[in-house]
Image (spheres, rainbow, N blue to C red):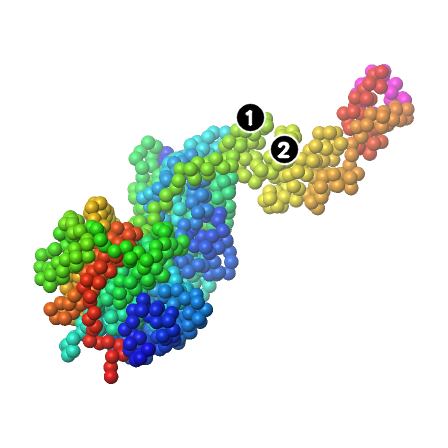
Amino acid sequence: MSALSDLLRLDIASARKGLADKQFTARELTEAYLAAADDARALNGFITETPEQALVDADAADARLQAGNAVAMTGMPIAQKDLFCTKGIRTTAASKILGDFKPEYESTVSGKLKADGAVLLGKANLDEFAMGSANITSAFGPVTNPWTPEGAATPLTPGGSSGGSAALVAAGAAIAATGTDTGGSIRQPAALCGVVGMKPTYGRCSRWGVVAFASSLDQSGPITRSVRDAAIMLGSMAGHDPKDSTSATAAPVDFEAALAGGVKGMRVGVPREYRTDGMPAEIDALWQEGIEMAKAAGAEIVDVSLPMTKMALPAYYIVALAEASSNLARYDGVRYCAREDGGDLTEMYSNTRGTGFGEEVRRRILIGTYVLSAGYYDAYYKQAQKVRTLIANDFNTAFNNVDVLLTPTTPSAAFAAGDVDDPVAMYMNDIFTVPASMAGLPGISVPAGLSADGLPLGLQIIGKPFDEASVLQMGQAIEDAAGFDKTPRLLAGAKP
Amino acid sequence: MSNIEGRDGEWEMVIGLETHAQVASKAKLFSSASAEFGGAPNDHVAFLDAGMPGMLPVINQRCVEAAVLSGFGMNSIINLKSIFDRKNYFYPDLPLGYQISQFSDPIVSGGWLDIELEGGVTKRIGVTRLHLEQDAGKSIHDQDPYRTLVDLNRAGVGLMEIVSEPDIGSAEEAAAYVTKLRAILRYLGVCDGNMEEGSLRCDVNLSMRRLGDELGTRCEIKNVNSIRFIREAIEFEARRQVEVLEDGGAIVQETRLFDPDRGETRSMRSKEESHDYRYFPDPDLPPLVLEQSYVDELRAGMPELPDAKKTRFVAELGLTPYDADVLTADRDNALYFEAAADGRDAKAVANWVTGEVFGRLNKDDVSINAAPVPAGELGALVDMIKSGQISGRQAKEAFEAMWADGKPAQTVVDELGLSQISDYSAIEALVDQVMQANMDKVEEYRGGKPKLIGFFVGQVMKASKGQANPASVNAMLKAKLDG
C-alpha cells in the first residue's frame, strides 16, 4: 500500500480484504490511525486515547490473521463511544461526575467487538450522559464537525449525542465507531457528518455495561462509512445477553449476507405526517430524490399515515427524562464518583450533583423528577406511556402494508453551536428519529446528498421490529443510488 | 379481647402488620452476590449492588418461587403478570438511588391465615398482598466519630413484604399472627424466620378508636424485630394514643421507632416530611410473567402446612388438639415428632417430645435440629418401654444419658445395665424365694391382710434390683398368694 493516508480511507469491507490479502498488516493499519491522532485531536473527537492498547490489539489481530481464525472485525481500528464501560480504561460518559472512573468490567457490546479482534483507538466524545443533539454538553468540550467550512466563525456541531463517534468516522480518524441511540443519537450525528448510522431494534444489542440514559429507549449501534460496514459491525455487536433482561432472544442474523436480498418489489412507505410545516425545501427535495432512488431500484412507493407523529417528541421527552432522573440517581458521591463535601448529607448530595452534572443534565433530571412526582405522574408519565403505545400501533398498522419507511433523518444540515440556544429548539432535531425510538424500531441514516451550503444530509429508513435486514437492503439501495462520495474538509492524514 | 379501658370508656385497637421476610436464597433478588447473613462488611456485593454504571438487574427465579409458594401458603391469588417498580429516594445505603419493589401490580394478592388464640379460639386475619422487593444496605453511625460507614452486604437481598388487613385487635393477636406467618414460611422453606438476624421483621400500623367508631389516625412503628417487642410496642403505642386522644389531642400520622431498652415508641418522621417516592415501572425489567403450568407445578409440590398437619395429627394419630398444636407450631419440631413417631404409638411419642425433649431443648437453649437425641433413637427408646424391656422410669434415666453423650438408646441401656425382667420363670424364682423367706407374712396375708401384697412386691423388686416388670410381679404374687 502506498501512503498511510490511503489506509485511512478504507472502509471495513475493503480493509478486511486488504488484511486477508496481506496487502498490509493490522499493525500497519492501526499505526496509520495513530499517526493521524493529531487530526482527531483537533476535532476533540476522543475523550481518552488508547494508543498502547491499540497496538496490543493490532498485534493480537495479526496473530489471528496469521492463524487463519480472523473474523470480519479483526484488526479494525475503532472508537468506542465513552458510554460503554471498558475494563480498566477510564469511562466518563462525558461527565465531570464520574471523575476518574475506571470500570472493573467490560460492557457486553464492547466486549464482543474486542473478542472479534477489533482494535481500540480510544473512547469517543459525546454529549454528557448522551443528553444532547450537538455534542456541546460534554464536560470535555465540544466536538468539531469535520465538515466545518474554512474560516467559519464558529465550528459546526457534529450532532449528538454520538458526535465524537460520527466526527471521527467521517474525518477518517477511526474506521468505525460504536454509538448509542435513545432518540436519534446515532442517526442524527451520522446524517450531520455524512456517514452511516444504524440503530437496531430495541433489545438487539445488550445494554449491559452501557451507562444508562433512558433504559426503555437506549440501544447501541454502529457508525460506519458504508451500509455494508454497518451490517458487518452490527453482526459483531448484536446478540442475546442473559445479563440484560430486556435483551431480545431473537435468532442471530447474518446481516451482511442479508444485503444481497435487494429491494426489488419492496414496499416503501412515505409517512405524510413527516412533511412538517416549515420543512426546509432542500430537505424535502432530498426526500423526493430518495423516493425516486427507491423507485428506480425496483421498490414500490406507498403513501402511509402515522397520525401520532407529532405527539412523539413531547411524549419522548417525558418518558426519557423520567427514566433518566432515576437512572442518574446513583451518581450521589457516596461510592465511586467525584464527591463534593457538604455540612450534612443533603448538602453533600446537592454539592456533588450540582457541580458534577452539567446544565443540560441537571435540566433533564429536574424535568424527569417533576413528571414522576405525586400529582403529575398521571398527567405526564402515564399519558406519555399511552401515547407511546399509540405510536407503536401507528407503525404496526403502516407495516401491515409496507416493508420499510423512508424519511429524512434530520430537519436541517449541521449547525453551529451558538445557532440553537433554546433547549426546546435543540430537542426539535430529533423530530424524525424519535418516533421509531419510541416504538423500538430499527432505523438507519444513510448520507444521500448535500445541502446548499455543501453539508451532508441523510435519509432515514425505518423497519419492522427485528427486520434490520430490510432496513439494510434499502439503505444499500439508497447508498448505491446516491453515490455519496464527498469527503469533509477536515480529513485525517490529509495534510501535506 | 384486650381493649383498653380509658378514663371514660373502652378503646379498641386496629392493627395491620407489614412483615418483611427475607427469601431463603443463595443469591440476591437481582444479582448473583451472596445473600448470606454476616460476612465481612461489603463482602457480598455485586457491581449491581454497588450501583455501578450500566449494571442491570436479572430476577432470581428462586425468589419468584418463594413468593408463589408463600402466596399459596396464605390462600392467596398468584398474579400471572406482575410488575417491578422503582421506589426513588436518596440514602447512602441505597446505591441505585431507588429500591426495586412492586407497587401497583404485586405477584400475590388477597388471602388469609387463621391464628390460634387462648382457649382454642381461631381468628381469620386477611392478607392484602405479598410483593418482592430489595433490601437496603446498612448505614453504621457508631464506628467512626465523624463518618457514617456503609455496608452493602444486605443491599439487594430479596424480601417478601407481606401486608395484612387491619384485622388484628390486640398485641396477642399480632403475636399469634406473626407466629403463624413465620411457621408457614418456615414450613415452605422460603424464609428461615430468624428475627434476631433480621430475616423477619415487622412494621406495625396501629390506630385507636372508641368501640364502633370510625377508624382513627394511625402511626407506623418501623422494623420491630421480635415477637416480644411487637407486643411491647403495641401495648405502649396503644396507651400513648389513648392518652393523647383522651387529653383532647389528635394523633399525628407519622413513622415511629420502638426502643426496646426503654420499652417505648418515638417519633421518626411525620407525614409532612415523608418522601414522594416517584414510583414508576422499572424499565430495566419486563413484566414478570408466570406460566400457569409453572404455578400449578409449584402448588403440587407444596409441603403440608401447619393447619393441615395439626388436623391430621388429631384425626389420624389421635393426639389431643393441644399436643397437635404444640407439635405443629414449628416445622422442625413437627418433622422430628413425625420421624420419631413413625410406626409407633404416636401419643406416647408425643408425650416424650412435648415433655422430655422440649424440656431439655428449653433448658439447654438449643433448637430441635441440634438435639443430641435423634428422632429415630427417641423412637427406639419408646419401643423398649412398649415391649417391656425397660420401665418408664428407666427410660427417663436412659434419655438423660443419651442427651448427655449422644449415644444410641440400646447402647445406653446396655451400658447402664437397664433391663426389666419380664421373663416368667425368672420372676417366678424370685417370687418363690421371697415367699419362702417370709412365710409368716404369707400366713398373715392369707389370714386376711391383702394389703401386704405391697410388701411382697417391694421385696421382689428389691431382689431383682428393680429390673423386674412390676406388673408381672404383681400378677404372679397375687396368683401364688391367693392360690
Which percent across, then down, holds residue B426? 85, 28
Tell me where the magenta segment starts and ends, as one range: B439-458
Which percent across, then down, holds residue A462? 23, 55
Q: Which mark is residue A2?
A: none
Q: Amino acid at mark 2?
A: Asp
Q: Quadrant of residue A137?
A: bottom left
The rendered magenta stretch, by its main secondary structure, is classed as helix
Q: Which mark is residue B342?
A: 2
In the rendered image, the vertical position of residue B212 relative to residue A372, given as above or below: above
Q: Quadrant of residue A459?
A: bottom left
In the rendered image, the vertical position of residue A121 relative to residue A308, given as above or below: below
Q: Dot 2: few (<14), some (14–19), or many (≥20) neighbours within 10 Å?
A: some
Element under disc 1: helix
| Letter of the chain that mark 1 sits on in the rendering | B
- Position of the N terminus of chain A by quadrant: bottom left
Given residues A197 and B126, the one toward you in this image is A197
Q: Which mark is residue B315?
A: 1
- Rounded to the nearest whole Å, what is the CA distance between mark 2 and mark 1? 16 Å
Q: Amino acid at mark 1?
A: Ala
Q: Residue at x 69, y 35 (%)?
A: B380
Given residues B10 and A95, the one toward you in this image is A95
Left or right of residue A455: residue B297? right
